Amino acid sequence: MFKLGDYNTLRIKKRTDFGLYLDGGDEGNILLPNRYVTPDMHIGDELEVFLYLDQDERIIATTLRPLAKVGEFAWLECAWTNEYGAFLNWGLMKDLFCPFREQKQRMQKGQRYYVYVMEDEKTHRLMATAKVERYQKKSGYELSLDFAEVLLNYLREHDGHCDLGDKSPAEDIAARFGVSKKVYKKAVGDLYRRRLINITESGITLTA
């Protein structure tokens, strides 16, 4: 039994004009499109591939490695939006959908958001949620250490500055990062003790 939204090792079953068909067991053959096929792939070989749904909701294989798989958190950029929600770039041909109901604020194109990758229980489609708290099962201390690295990456990608500080409203922190003010302050404290940031009246900045 393979796992959707995860890496699977599947055997090459046959070659077609469209690519290679991999043995998906009870689910039948799964296509690895030609764009991912290399000359060293032969019938009978086993490949590690990532499985997700294509535009027509068919199970498809890829040798690309997304920024996150089901069950993981990631900092993803919004590629585009429509009347149903936002679509996030996670490194695959098909962007990852985040419906309005799973957003803390309306996502905007070009902005990055901290999300959790999941499989919808009803439709079995892969999707993202910005309401990450219900999936964070670690202690407050562990969460603050994890988030410290997320915050550090955010600073590096935003010219070394974040306008949210210790006195910023909890709802602003939650809307942007999906964490509580307590976790945010602990992460800021950790980075400050490691001399990686400076704390100013306008927020926090990376040290030179």
Image: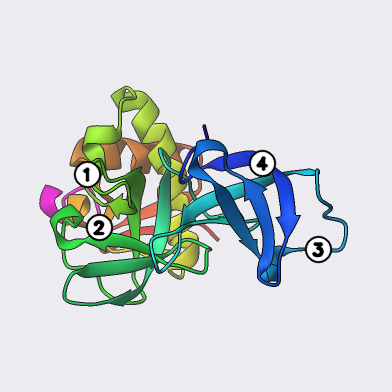
According to the image, label 1 marks what residue? 122
Residue wearing tag 3: 38
Where residue 26 appears, x then y in whole percent?
51, 37
How far across and how far down the image is residue 120, in percent?
Answer: 27, 45
Q: Secondary structure at mark 4?
A: strand
User: The C terminus appears in which quarter of the rendering?
Assistant: bottom right
Mark 4, mark 2: which one is toward the viewer? 4
The kind of secondary structure element at disc 3 is: loop
Q: Is label 3 or label 2 in front?
A: 3
**Horizontal placement of 64 versus 135: left or right?**
right
Q: Give the structural element (helix, strand or loop) at label 2.
A: helix
Q: First in sequence: mark 2 or mark 1?
A: 1
Mark 1 vs mark 4: which is more N-terminal? Answer: 4
- Mark 3 or mark 2, which has the lower sequence index? 3
**Within 10 angstroms of label 3, few (less than 14), some, or many (20 or more) residues?**
few
Magenta-highlighted stretch: main secondary structure?
loop
* Up/down of 3 relative to 106, above or below: above
Amino acid at the residue labelled 3 = Thr
Determine if the magenta segment contains residue 167. yes
The answer for how far apart the CA atoms under marks 4 and 3 are is 16 Å
Residue 176 is labelled as 2
Q: Earlier in the sequence, mark 4 or mark 2?
A: 4
Q: CA distance from mark 1 to mark 3?
A: 36 Å
Q: Residues within 10 Å of mark 1 (few under 14, many from 20)?
A: few
Q: Quadrant of residue 133?
A: top left
Q: Amino acid at mark 4?
A: Leu
| Span shown in magenta | 165-171
